[in-house]
């Protein structure tokens, strides 16, 4: 307990926290992200219904406008869709899927990209050429196309979306990690580890890996936002998540069909939420980049 | 008794051509892919006795650091032989090198880059020991503290990270790491050149005290003539990957024979003495190690070069003063039957 | 304040007013961890034609004095107080546009790293000529002739061809010659050289020191040589200023100061240089390390490392006191001066 409180007080006195407190956009970003997290964790207990429990749906209440408009009801603050689903409840549940996909794809990309980048940078030679050429090919291959291939071969599903996102996302980690690895492996502490008789596996894990991770924090943060956006586009195009697990993107698509009939709230509110969360994540990412980039110091 | 370290005709060449596509050149209408070979160390021989300090001095690019890193097998030697404590380690692979690691350790130049910023000091200094003594985990902490005490650091330093230390203290940590396996030979690659002069004196004193106490030997690489003079029993002067002159420290400083050694000594600033006259200045620049000059490596800048220097590469020959010189000017005074002298 | 007597050869009698006069200079950096007083109340004068050595270890503040004179202190650094009077004008009252007319034209600067001091995208001819274009009204043909003359002066052979070369086509030593040429070409009255030979080999170092000395003697310019290398300073400078933790601990004529330093820090620095006499097996060492400049001890900053420190030293900061002609030290218990 003492260790926890001492590390908390050390953090509170750190330069990082000091700069954070003076950076209003960083505070705004973290407030947005924190509210979003709170919404998806405790939100399901606060909203009117579980939108995926058919028994709770009232067809009578379909296409209700938001509460402050004529015909709106206070029960459905942001209105309902064609099946009587509460839009707010759909957003709460859809955000969970969107954020899960964003985070899981980021973690997967980070793991894969870091491993390949370490191997390429540390061993060099043919292995390096091979990995980096695959990375180049991967970059010239849009994620939509990858997703399309996967869907046509295996059908839709969250797992296919993840694979499509990771297959594009790992490249940026591999490139950054390879660069830092090349730089770190030149340093004398790695030579010292060699002289101490450490096998390569230990040198990579104990010495190189901890020293190449810092720049990844920024990339990983911003990538969660990017992935949420890509996933939304994939779902909007119909090559994303299945109808049984609607993300924010799928909600937009569902409402899009009736958007021009004046029933705008079904797609506009999920869209606003996507915008808000990605905005918050990017504000946070920008702050981290300024803080962790030694060149700007 | 055999010397502790015996290096014979060591050569180290690097391929600097890069990948195949980087090598492609268009020459006279034909596409060629020439290789660019860096001749970093060219047939260097040396011996170090137990308890002895051999200083290697030379300017940047003379191959002294490559020599050090080849001897400790951070680079695989291209040709020649390295015999440590009677065992030929020239072609030892990773597994066979492991027991050698406790006999030979290294101290590095840059006190900032030579310590992993994410490791605690106690872990840094014990790493060679733990790697070479698997299973022994009982008295690790005590050993770490004893090592730190040896280099003048207290137990309160053991759990800190490198960034909390000054340059001199970091170099002490690096020395403690090398000592953890109680090596017989320590290779020190410019260990004090990144330090302020007052700290430099502290580290040099510490290194000499430890040597006197533990009885190991140093291969001491430096560009600083006053440091090498202070610390070495014998000195080797390198130029362009060749050993041009070796001998006891006093002999080299009192009576330098090779024109390069003379120029080097003349150029070094001495406290309170006026700037050396321009007459002793050597002209021009060090030739590229990609294209070694024929004959003597120093002839392109040597004020005394004559026609034989371009034709024939001089070899180290023992001289009357006690040193060996690779220079045709001194062939006449060379001792007979000493062509294969090891420094 | 009286000017210290100079070594023979640097006539100062005909130049009663100093070229540069620094008074009470304080350059502080406001960082998160506290205020770094990089330069904390420094006074010195520089006569026309004089070579002054600023020596000290890292953290002594010697480079920051050079940057302060050039007006190159960036945030979080700030010149808090003082006066830098150059040719009768206080440089600290000038704005950026005014400083730009001083830099290069009236004060030249040579940096430590010849690899980064030149712009890799321009030929050295461009970079030399730019100085003349900015600071003189010479026509193009005359500018080119001056560039060629300047390159020849700094010992670059075939200057006509070399003008068209890019920095990467020169070796480190040659680049530093080019940097010296650029610093000198507009005819500055003062040259500030910040560790000009530290990155170079010892044989090249000697060449460049000789070159700089010859250049300032020919043009009767003054030189501030900033270095950690006492031996190099002893060969070059007329007078030496020794800095420790942003303050002057001792100053005086070079040979006098090296023969008989009064401050214990100067003595320690001189003694820690390995000496020819190997009978003295252990080097003299200054114990401990430079204190954290954000939390300097009260009194004398050197007291924690000083063998002669008394209780007084830990309470009262000593002031720079002249105790021999031209030689002054900030010490309560100075060493006996050898004159």
Image: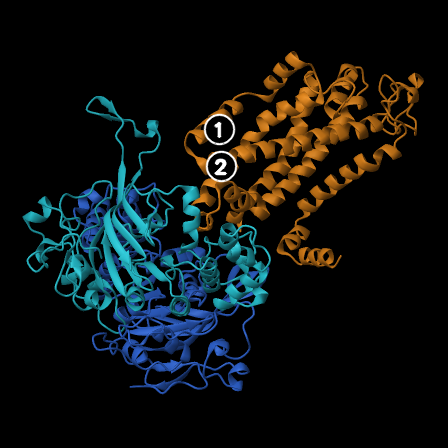
Query: Left or right: C46 with respect to B249?
Result: right
B314 sits left or right of B207 in the view: left
Q: Which chain is orange?
A: A
Chain whose colour in the figure is cyan: B
Residue B7 rendering spot, x and y as whole percentages: 27, 51
Which image quadrant for residue A216? top right
Q: Quadrant of residue B248?
A: bottom left
Q: CA distance from mark 2 to mark 1?
A: 10 Å
The answer to whether residue B12 shows anywhere in this view is: yes
The label shown at residue A131 is 1
Please determine whether, in this image, residue C226 is positioned above or below residue C270: above
Helix or strand or loop: what does disc 2 sit on?
A: helix
Location of residue A28 in the rendering, given as x and y in whole percent from the top left corner = 71, 43
Residue B160 visible = no
Say if A15 sits above or below C282 in the image: above
Mark 1 neighbour density, 10 Å: few (under 14) some (14–19) many (20 or more): many
Where A73 sits versus C174, above or below? Answer: above
Q: Is residue A190 left or right of residue A246?
A: left
Residue receiving disc 2 = A178
Marker count (numbered): 2
Q: Is residue A285 placed above or below B216 in the rendered structure?
A: above
- Quick check: C325 left or right of A180? left
Co-location on one chain, circles 2 and 1: yes
């Amino acid at each position: 307990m003492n260790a926890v409180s001492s590390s908390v007080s050390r953090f509170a006195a750190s330069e990082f926290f000091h700069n954070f407190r003076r950076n209003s956009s960083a505070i705004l970003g973290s407030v947005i992200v924190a509210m979003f997290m709170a919404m998806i964790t405790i939100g399901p207990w606060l909203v009117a219904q579980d939108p995926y429990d058919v028994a709770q749906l009232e067809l009578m209440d379909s296409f209700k406008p938001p509460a402050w408009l004529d015909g709106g009801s206070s029960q459905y603050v942001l209105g309902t869709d064609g099946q009587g689903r509460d839009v707010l409840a759909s957003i709460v549940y859809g955000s969970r899927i969107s954020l899960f996909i964003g985070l899981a794809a980021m973690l997967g990309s980070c793991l894969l990209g870091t491993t390949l980048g370490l191997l390429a940078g540390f061993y060099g030679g043919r292995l390096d050429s091979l990995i980096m050429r695959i990375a180049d090919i991967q970059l010239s291959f849009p994620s939509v196309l990858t997703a399309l291939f996967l869907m046509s071969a295996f059908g839709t599903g969250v797992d296919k979306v993840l694979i499509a996102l990771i297959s594009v996302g790992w490249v940026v980690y591999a490139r950054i990690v390879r660069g830092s690895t090349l730089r770190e492996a030149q340093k004398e502490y790695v030579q010292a580890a060699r002289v101490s008789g450490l096998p390569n596996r230990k040198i990579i894990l104990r010495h190189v890996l901890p020293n190449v991770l810092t720049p990844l924090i920024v990339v990983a943060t911003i990538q969660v936002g990017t992935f949420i956006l890509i996933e939304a586009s994939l779902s909007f195009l119909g090559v994303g998540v299945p109808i049984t697990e609607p993300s924010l993107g799928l909600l937009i698509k569902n409402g899009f069909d009736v958007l021009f009939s004046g029933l705008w709230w079904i797609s506009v509110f999920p869209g606003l939420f996507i915008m808000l969360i990605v905005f918050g994540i990017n504000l946070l990412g920008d702050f981290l980049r300024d803080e962790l980039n030694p060149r700007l110091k | 008794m055999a010397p502790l370290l015996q290096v014979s005709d060591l050569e180290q060449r690097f391929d600097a051509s890069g990948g195949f596509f980087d090598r492609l050149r268009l020459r006279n209408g034909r596409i060629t892919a020439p290789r660019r070979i860096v001749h970093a160390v060219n047939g260097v021989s040396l011996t170090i006795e137990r308890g002895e300090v051999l200083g290697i001095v030379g300017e940047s690019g003379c191959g002294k650091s490559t020599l050090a890193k080849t001897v400790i097998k951070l680079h695989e030697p291209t040709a020649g032989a390295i015999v440590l404590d009677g065992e030929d380690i020239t072609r030892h692979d990773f597994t066979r090198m492991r027991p050698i690691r406790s006999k030979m350790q290294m101290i590095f130049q840059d006190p900032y880059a030579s310590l992993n910023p994410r490791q605690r000091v106690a872990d840094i200094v014990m790493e060679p020991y733990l790697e070479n003594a698997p299973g022994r985990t009982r008295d690790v902490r005590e050993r770490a503290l004893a090592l730190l005490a040896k280099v003048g650091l207290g137990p309160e330093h053991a759990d800190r990270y490198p960034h909390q230390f000054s340059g001199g203290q970091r170099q002490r940590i690096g020395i403690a790491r090398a000592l953890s396996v109680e090596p017989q030979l320590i290779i020190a690659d410019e260990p004090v050149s990144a330090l302020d002069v007052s700290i430099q004196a502290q580290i040099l004193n510490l290194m000499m005290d430890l040597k006197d106490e533990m009885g190991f030997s140093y291969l001491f690489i430096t560009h600083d003539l006053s440091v090498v003079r202070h610390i070495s029993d014998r000195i080797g002067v390198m130029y362009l990957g060749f050993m041009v002159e070796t001998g006891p420290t006093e002999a080299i400083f009192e009576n330098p024979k090779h024109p390069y050694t003379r120029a080097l000594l003349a150029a070094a600033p001495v406290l309170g003495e006026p700037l050396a006259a321009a007459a002793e200045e050597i002209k021009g620049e060090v030739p590229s190690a990609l294209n070694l000059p024929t004959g003597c490596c120093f002839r392109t800048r040597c004020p005394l070069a004559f026609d034989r220097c371009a034709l024939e590469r001089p070899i180290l020959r023992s001289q009357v003063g006690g040193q060996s010189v690779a220079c045709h000017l001194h062939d006449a005074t060379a001792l007979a039957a000493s062509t294969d002298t090891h420094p | 304040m009286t000017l210290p007597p100079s070594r023979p050869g640097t006539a100062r009698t005909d130049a009663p007013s100093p070229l540069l006069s620094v008074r009470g200079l304080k350059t502080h950096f406001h960082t998160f961890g506290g205020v770094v007083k990089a330069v904390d109340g420094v006074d010195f004068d520089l006569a026309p034609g004089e070579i002054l050595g600023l020596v000290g270890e890292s953290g002594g503040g010697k480079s920051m004095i050079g940057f302060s004179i050039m007006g190159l202190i960036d945030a979080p650094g700030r010149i808090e107080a003082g006066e830098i009077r150059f040719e009768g004008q206080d440089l600290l009252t000038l704005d950026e546009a005014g400083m730009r007319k001083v830099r290069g034209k009236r004060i030249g600067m040579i940096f430590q790293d010849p690899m980064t001091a030149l712009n890799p995208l321009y030929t050295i001819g461009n970079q030399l000529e730019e100085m003349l274009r900015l600071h003189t009204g010479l026509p193009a043909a005359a500018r080119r002739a001056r560039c060629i003359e300047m390159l020849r002066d700094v010992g670059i052979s075939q200057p006509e061809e070399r003008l068209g070369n890019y920095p990467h086509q020169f070796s480190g030593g040659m680049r530093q010659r080019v940097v010296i040429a650029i610093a000198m070409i507009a005819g500055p009255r003062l040259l500030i050289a910040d560790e000009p030979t530290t990155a170079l080999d010892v044989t090249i170092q000697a060449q460049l020191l000789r070159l700089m000395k010859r250049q300032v003697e020919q043009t009767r310019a003054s030189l501030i040589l900033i270095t950690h290398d006492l031996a190099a300073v002893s060969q070059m400078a007329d007078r030496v200023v020794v800095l420790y933790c942003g303050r002057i601990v001792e100053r005086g004529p070079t040979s006098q100061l090296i023969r008989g330093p009064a401050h214990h820090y100067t003595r320690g620095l001189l003694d820690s240089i390995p000496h020819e006499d190997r009978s003295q097996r252990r080097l003299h060492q200054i114990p401990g390390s430079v204190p954290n400049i954000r939390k300097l001890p009260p009194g004398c900053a050197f007291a924690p490392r000083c063998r002669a420190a008394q209780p007084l030293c830990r309470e009262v900061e000593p002031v720079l006191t002249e105790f021999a002609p031209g030689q002054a030290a900030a010490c309560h218990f100075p060493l006996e001066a050898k004159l």
